[in-house]
């Protein structure tokens, strides 16, 4: 039960999440995204081994963003109709404004929790393999992404090496953000030079092992597509529909 | 007609890259038969690797190169093979252990190869088990490739090649990124495998002295890409560096007492003390992860030290990839970057490092040896006269090593102090005044160079091989 979301076919999960996001975008009342946000949390509570510490850490910036939306919509909103429900420090907050502000910030929460659901329960390698097997992504592209993924730790290491080297040369003037940005550009150039060489070597190594980019016929670990994947997908979509209906009713 | 058991045969083959005027390979004729162990040697840029890529069909397709003459692979014309077809029979292991893999674990990487060959899924498990067993890598089946050492990665790459059950194994400088001890172990392992599988082995290699008597035959390519010699393989002697005659000055350049480094609650370097004088060359050696880079970075102030004091002339650091240091679009600006040296001093420096003729070039676009000279130049222009070179010998051929030797020797003569992190004890024996041995983040000691070479047990504990031909240095009057 608690592995359900992790074991779900990544392509199906990806499609489901995309549809859910598009669906949510059509509802402008505050209740729909709020209800959906909570139902996603409940879903994760019972169907995943979510590490809630990591989840909260990722959620934190989104929560700030949501609050930012709330605040700016209230303070800087264009004059709208509706009755004034609250006024303080010279601001008059109308009920329409308040509803719009809540709707925007709950949307941020709903979308981000959905993205995190996908990101934190999906193994990137399995995702790419599934895209290739179920959605017929070209193997050239798929293995290209996988090679890139293998290079990430090496690139991270190089980034710090170069940063240290530049600091030693007194090049890292990091007083203003634009200077830091300029500094990053200087670090990226040697990294790119190395990455081009690495990419060519990796391509040769793959080709020498018989990789041609043709669609493959056999898989060692086929990413399965089972009935329960569709079950879970419809569960998520049901949540979208249920929270839309409930949201529409509550705000009517 | 090629001989029936000839695997490769070339008749009057020339090869040219589309943008070049000159042929990279010219008029090659030879054939290789089943079960041979052939070394292809020659200086850098002689087209050795190009030749190898003609044998596994990576060229001419990938570079639009122009081939003249006849290449027969297994008795068939090379052009008649479909893409990928030859790679079932000819497997290749490349030199860089870090860019040969596309999957996270050993098992998945092996499966990638089998999937390329359209092996039925039901047979894959058995084939993977078999190749891991015969290569002695069964314990690594689920290991993450990125966490393995360079030597192990090369073994995994070889296993990935052998899982195809090929008839020929091509090796493209497979040990150039490995330290000598790991390289020796890899060659021993390869020797046993070749005997088990009876496979034909063809290796491109510029440091044949490490290979002992592994090969049967050597094809030597000259700088113009023609065959200079095709002969029975005779074990190569390590090559000799010139003798160093200059004196260490009696002026202290750097001294550290009680230096230690802690990071994230872990002690990377236990307290140690050292000093070095002007004109002195110290080699820092020890197993991977013993704290060599940490020590170097702590001494030149990149890492924060947790305790101790370092009194030193300004320190310069040249990473293994010198281009990590570069900040500007020309060599001249690179040296002038900090504005510490006057124009006259810069000109002198460029003359002494032979950089004047490339002063207007982009530092990213010059040769590797030149990049290192630019990096050292930049450090010296900043008046940093204690130089730390991180792994400058790794992956270098004979000519490059000699050039490096001359470069370091000339800096020592000018009174600079040079620290070198290296596994290459032949190089160390030629250049070092002192050897600093590290193990598990602790300094075993700093020894006079000559004493260390006479103590193989001490070297073995630090995963080092005594320099071949050390006796010659011991006897010489230096």
Image (cartoon, rainbow, N blue to C red):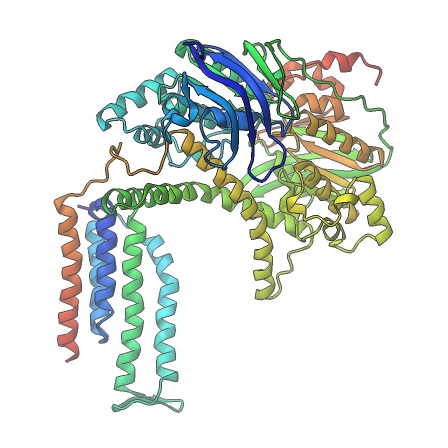
In the displayed structure, would residue A13 be above or below residue A90? above
| Residue B477 appears left or right of B133 | right
Say which quarter of the image contains residue A128.
Answer: top left
Q: Is residue A39 left or right of residue B244?
A: left
Compared to residue B375, the image places residue B452 above or below, namely: above
Front residue of A240/A149: it is A149
Of residue B198 and residue A103, the one placed in the foreground of this image is B198
Q: Looking at this view, is B430 or B287 the one in front? A: B430
Q: Position of residue B395 (x, y in %)?
A: 60, 29
Residue B393, horizontal then vertical, whole percent:
65, 30
Q: Residue at x 41, y 44 (%)?
A: A149
Query: Is residue B107 depicted above or below B332 in this figure?
Result: above
Viewer can see residue B377 = yes
Check the picture and name the quadrant holding the C terminus of chain A.
bottom left
Residue A48 visible in the displayed image = no
Residue A28 is left or right of residue A190, and the answer is left
Place of residue B209 in the rendered image (x, y in percent of width and height, measured from the top left) = 63, 16
Q: Dividing the picture into quarters, in which one does residue A77 lie?
A: bottom left
**How many marks are shown on the rendered structure?**
0
Measured from the top left, where is residue B18 in percent x and y?
A: 55, 38
Relative horizontal placement of residue A30, taking residue A67 as reference (left or right) = left
Which residue is located at x 43 percent, y 26 percent? B157
Q: Is residue B188 above or below residue A87?
A: above
């Amino acid at each position: 039960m608690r592995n359900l979301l992790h074991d779900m076919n990544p392509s199906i999960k990806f499609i489901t999440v995309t549809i859910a996001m598009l669906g949510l975008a059509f509802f402008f009342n505050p209740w729909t995204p709020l209800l959906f946000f909570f139902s996603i949390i409940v879903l994760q509570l019972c169907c995943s081994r979510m590490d809630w510490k990591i989840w909260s850490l990722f959620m934190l910036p989104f929560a700030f963003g949501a609050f930012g939306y709330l605040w700016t919509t209230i303070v800087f909103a264009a004059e709208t109709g509706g009755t004034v429900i609250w006024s303080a420090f010279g601001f008059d907050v109308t009920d329409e404004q308040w509803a719009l502000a809540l709707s925007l910030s709950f949307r941020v929460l709903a979308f981000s929790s959905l993205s995190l659901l996908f990101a934190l329960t999906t193994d990137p390698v399995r995702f790419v393999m599934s895209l290739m097997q179920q959605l017929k992504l070209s193997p050239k592209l798929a293995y290209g992404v996988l090679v890139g993924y293998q290079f990430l730790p090496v690139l991270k290491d190089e980034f710090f090496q170069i940063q240290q080297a530049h600091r030693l040369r007194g090049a890292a003037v990091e007083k203003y953000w634009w200077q830091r940005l300029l500094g990053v550009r200087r670090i990226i150039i040697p990294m790119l030079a190395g990455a081009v060489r690495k990419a060519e070597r990796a391509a040769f190594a793959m080709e020498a092992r018989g990789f041609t980019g043709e669609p493959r016929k056999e898989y060692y670990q086929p990413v399965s597509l089972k009935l329960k994947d569709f079950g879970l997908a419809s569960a998520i979509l049901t949540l979208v529909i249920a929270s839309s209906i409930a949201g529409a009713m509550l705000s009517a | 007609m090629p001989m029936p058991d000839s695997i490769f045969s070339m008749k009057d083959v020339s090869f040219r890259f589309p943008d070049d005027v000159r042929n990279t390979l010219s008029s090659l004729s030879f054939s290789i038969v089943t079960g041979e162990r052939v070394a292809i040697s020659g200086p850098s840029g002689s087209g050795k690797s190009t030749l190898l890529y003609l044998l596994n069909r990576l060229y001419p397709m990938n570079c639009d190169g122009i081939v003249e003459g006849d290449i027969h692979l297994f008795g068939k014309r090379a052009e008649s093979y479909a893409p990928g077809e030859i790679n079932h029979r000819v497997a290749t292991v490349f030199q860089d252990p870090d860019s040969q893999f596309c999957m996270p674990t050993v098992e998945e990487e092996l499966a990638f190869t089998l999937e390329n060959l359209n092996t039925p899924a039901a047979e894959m498990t058995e084939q993977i088990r078999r190749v891991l067993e015969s290569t002695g890598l069964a314990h690594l089946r689920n290991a993450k490739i990125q966490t393995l050492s360079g030597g192990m990665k090369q073994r995994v790459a070889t296993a990935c090649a052998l899982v195809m059950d090929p008839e020929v194994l091509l090796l493209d400088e497979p040990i150039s990124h490995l330290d000598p001890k790991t390289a020796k172990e890899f060659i021993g392992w390869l020797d046993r495998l070749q005997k088990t599988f009876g496979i034909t082995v063809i290796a491109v290699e510029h440091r044949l002295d490490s290979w002992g008597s592994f090969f049967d035959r050597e094809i030597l390519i000259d700088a113009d890409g023609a065959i200079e010699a095709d002969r029975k393989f005779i074990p190569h002697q390590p090559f000799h560096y010139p003798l160093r005659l200059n004196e260490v000055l009696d002026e202290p350049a750097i001294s550290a007492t009680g230096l230690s480094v802690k990071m994230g609650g872990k002690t990377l370097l236990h307290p140690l003390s050292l000093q070095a004088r002007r004109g002195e060359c110290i080699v820092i050696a020890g197993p991977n992860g013993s704290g060599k880079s940490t020590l170097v970075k702590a001494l030149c102030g990149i890492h924060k030290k947790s305790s101790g004091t370092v009194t030193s002339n300004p320190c310069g650091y040249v990473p293994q990839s010198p281009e990590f240091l570069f900040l500007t679009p020309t060599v001249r600006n690179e040296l002038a970057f900090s504005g510490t040296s006057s124009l006259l001093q810069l000109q002198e420096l460029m003359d002494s490092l032979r950089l004047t003729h490339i002063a207007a070039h982009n530092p990213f676009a010059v040769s590797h040896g030149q990049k290192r000279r630019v990096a050292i130049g930049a450090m010296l222009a900043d008046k940093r006269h204690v130089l730390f070179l991180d792994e400058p010998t790794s992956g270098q051929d004979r000519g490059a090593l000699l050039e490096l030797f001359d470069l370091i020797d000339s800096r020592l003569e000018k009174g600079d102090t040079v620290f070198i992190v290296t596994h290459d004890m032949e190089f160390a024996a030629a250049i070092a005044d002192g050897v600093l041995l590290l193990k598990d983040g602790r300094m075993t000691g700093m020894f006079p160079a000559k004493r260390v070479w006479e103590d193989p047990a001490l070297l073995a504990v630090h995963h080092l091989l005594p320099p071949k031909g050390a006796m010659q240095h011991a006897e010489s009057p230096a």
